[in-house]
Image (cartoon, rainbow, N blue to C red):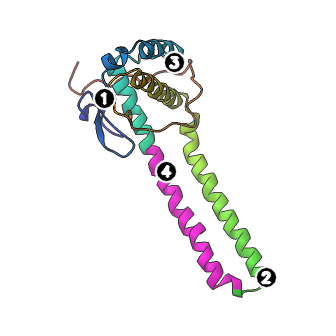
Amino acid sequence: MGDYHALEFGKFVDDQGTAHDMVPSAVIASVPEAKRAAEKYGREVRFDFLDDRAVHWMLFQRREDTEKAGVLGCLFVIPLLVLGGGAWPFWDLVASEKSRRFQIAFIVAEALILCGVAVGAYLARRASLLDPVIRNTRCRARLYRKIVGIARHGGADIPRLYPYYGMYATSRKFFPEAPDRPIPERQGSS
């Protein structure tokens, strides 16, 4: 977990770990269609897309979520490469010369191991896929990306790739009953 206050206000980190400047809400609000979209989507997901502090916190939470998923992805890919990719040379060099019974046993064992790895990855990621607080952040991030696109097409000076993240598969449904994570207070402030 990162420290929200370690990064200066107005900066955020993308999926590759690069810090970028956040586009101020005034730039988005300068395009009437984008302002209307921000207000409309904001009502739908209980979020003020024109509040820089709230957007900054949402982008931070989105990055934390992506970072956790990246670690789990690496933990999934390594065994997949070793067991999935390593099975073919083993097959060519060893198993193809063995009896039919050994070949069938090898295929079944390999399939079970790969299924086990896939199920393990799903179970490890399942909690965050079902957590309504995290899914609400993903939903808001998806809508923010859409609002920024509307502003860009309306003539706002926004970098083409901003906000530098992709779409989420689990970002369609908003859970109004889920609580919001409060913005943490700076240590030492009262």
Q: Does the magenta stretch include residue 93?
A: yes
Q: What residue type is labelled 2?
A: Arg
Foreground tag (3 vs 4): 3
Q: Earlier in the sequence, mark 1 or mark 2?
A: 1
Foreground tag (1 vs 2): 1
Q: Considering only vertical position in the picture, is 184 above or below 170?
A: above
Where residue 3 sits in the image (x, y, percent)? 30, 36
Residue position for label 3: 45
Q: Earlier in the sequence, mark 1 or mark 3?
A: 1
Residue position for label 2: 100
Count of numbered circles in the view = 4
Q: Is residue 82 magenta?
A: yes
Q: Distance between the residues labelled 1 and 3?
A: 21 Å
Q: Nearer the viewer, residue 64 or 144?
A: 144
What residue occupies the far right of the structure in this picture?
A: 101
Residue position for label 4: 72
Q: Which amino acid does label 1 sit on?
A: Met
Q: Earlier in the sequence, mark 3 or mark 2?
A: 3
Residue position for label 1: 22
Q: Which of marks 4 and 2 is nearer the N terminus?
A: 4
